[in-house]
Image (spheres, helix red, strand yellow):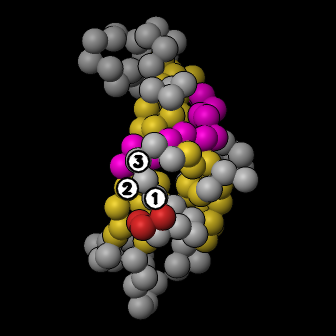
Amino acid sequence: MIPGWFDGTHLIGTRCTTCQAVFFPPHQGFCRDPRCEGEELVPQRLSRRGTVWSYTNACYPPPAPFLAAEPYEPVTLAAVELARERIVVLGQVKDLAVEDLRVGMELELTEGTLADGPRVWMWGLPR
């Protein structure tokens, strides 16, 4: 897990206190909205559920410096829209193939293990 991105139940983003825009991954410094001059960003727990906005699979291992298990196994990726925050968050999908997904279906934040071992947050079917 990347420290500061996940608290065990929610992804953590940042919210601009000036325009209320929410961003993920979290960052510091200034608001990413070019129309806003805000410089105060506060942590924001993101919704645990969203709907599939788009999806694909990654059939080739990522280039260095990223690590991939050998032999490489394709993974499913989904861009999930969080309605309350009005953002789309891309992440790996747990236990579902591309054939199982459709635009508009609901996914929930969960944890899973990457092929090379680390535990990370992923999208999965709601429990």
Left of 28 or right of it: where is 95?
right
Three-letter amino acid code at the position of disc 3? Val
Q: Is residue 49 magenta?
A: yes
Q: Which of 82/70 is in front?
A: 82
Give the secondary structure at mark 2.
strand
On screen, residue 40 above or below 101? above
Identify the residue position indicated by label 2 in the image: 55
**Residue 66, image x, y percentages:** 38, 70
The numbered mark at residue 82 is none
Please report the bounds of the magenta region as a residue range: 43-54
The numbered mark, 1 or 2, whose residue comes first in the sequence reads 2
Left of 54 or right of it: where is 115?
right
The numbered mark at residue 103 is 3
Three-letter amino acid code at the position of disc 2? Tyr
Identify the residue position indicated by label 1 in the image: 101
**Residue 85, image x, y percentages:** 51, 26
**Quadrant occupied by the N terminus:** bottom right
Q: Is residue 28 visible?
A: no
Q: Nearer the viewer, mark 1 or mark 2?
A: 1
